[in-house]
Amino acid sequence: MQALILAGGKGTRLRPLTVYTPKPIVPIANRPLLFYQIDLLRNAGITDITLSLSYQPDKIEQILGNGSELGVRLRYITEPSPMGTAGAYRFAADVANDTALVLNGDILTDLDLKKIIEFHRSRKADATIALMTVEDPTHYGLVQVNDDGRVISFVEKPSEKEAAALANTINAGIYVLEPSILDLVAKDTYKSFEYHIFPDILERDLPFYGYVMMGEYWLDIGTPESYLKAHIDLLSGKIGGQTLAEKPDHDAATHAEIDRRSVVGEGCTIKPGARIINSVIGPGAHVEEKALVEDSVIWSHTRIASYAEVRSSVIGRSCHVGRNVI
Ligand code: GDD
Ligand code: MG
């Protein structure tokens, strides 16, 4: 089976972090977000992966290369202009000649993909989507299933009124699709799974199922708030299968305090009296005397000057937080 990762979005809501760093490679605990998805696919035995790109594709390709370091084979397809989620799948048509696993490129999850694939096969489905329960479904695709797990309605970005009338199960952005779905997507046009293809599948009454996730971790990294939340969750061990890398080489003064949860990148300098608590510090960053970084994410080569205090914040690359600033 092949996989397609939809990674062409502009990441607008995550600006300014995504101005120079496309969302698929924003660092999560100092590793590009797509690495986590690639781990997930490889753990399910899927090593043929196509990345569907549109925004800043060269940067992504530069970082991920041919995938050999991650134990997979990566292929890149860049749309001339964004073709929508389903248009991108159509554009990568030879991936879809077989059963395909399609992933939104901005989700962090520990779902065992083998489970949804098995579920899909056992139902002889044409399309299966993973479902997650959330408190406020208005930012997602709201999905209703019947007792057999068959999808009976799909409403993308429902209004509050629509959401109130239905259960809070949403599209988690993980699909198993048979090649028959490809025929539903017109060539060379903008098409969205969420607005066009899923409603069309329902209309045609094709076997369309929802696999409800149970207790697995899942998060859409779409906003600065969720980006920070992903880190806090990761540091507290809430995301299964993720053992954070050993602390690499950095220069920490003996009188600096780095708690056990924090991750400090390579080549960082942590000065005496500095405190790093429940945070991720990017490579080459400097945290100076008596500065505090707590519940925060600091990108590479940023300097936190002495006595500054950074709490529950995300600071981008090569920034300078001045002395005494809180
Ligand atoms: N190649 C390509 N081309 N990729 C695209 C395009 C495109 O034109 N448009 C979006 N994508 C990619 C994005 O990069 C992202 O990884 C994924 O498709 C989803 O797009 P988002 O813009 O992040 O959508 P969303 O978060 O508002 O909603 C989607 O995800 C929710 C779950 O996180 C929908 O699928 C919802 O139904 C779902 O609940
Ligand atoms: Mg999203």
Image (cartoon, grey):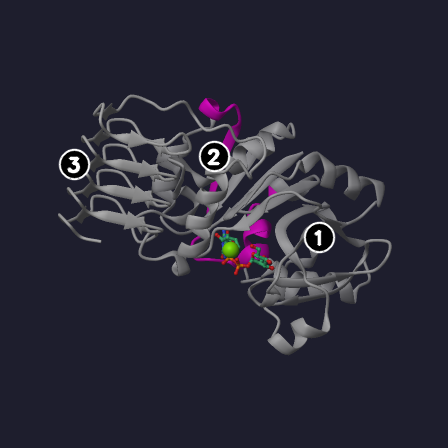
Quadrant into which the N terminus falls: top right
Three-letter amino acid code at disc 2?
Answer: Phe
For this rendering, which residue is in front, 109 or 128? 109
Q: Which mark is residue 181?
A: 1
Looking at the image, is mark 2 or mark 3 earlier in the sequence?
Answer: 2
Whether 69 is among the magenta residues is yes
Three-letter amino acid code at disc 3?
Answer: Glu
Residue lying furthest left: 323
Q: CA distance from mark 2 to mark 3?
A: 34 Å
> Residue 99: image x %, image y %?
71, 40
Q: Which residues are magenta?
A: 68-94
Residue 240 falls left or right of residue 292: right
> Residue 137: image x %, image y %?
61, 64
Q: Which mark is residue 35?
A: 2
Q: CA distance from mark 1 to mark 2?
A: 28 Å
Q: CA distance from mark 3 to mark 1?
A: 59 Å
Three-letter amino acid code at disc 1?
Answer: Ile
Q: Does the closest atom of ligand 2 sit within 8 Å of the Cβ of label 3?
A: no
> Residue 100: image x %, image y %?
66, 41
Q: Quadrant of residue 254?
A: top left
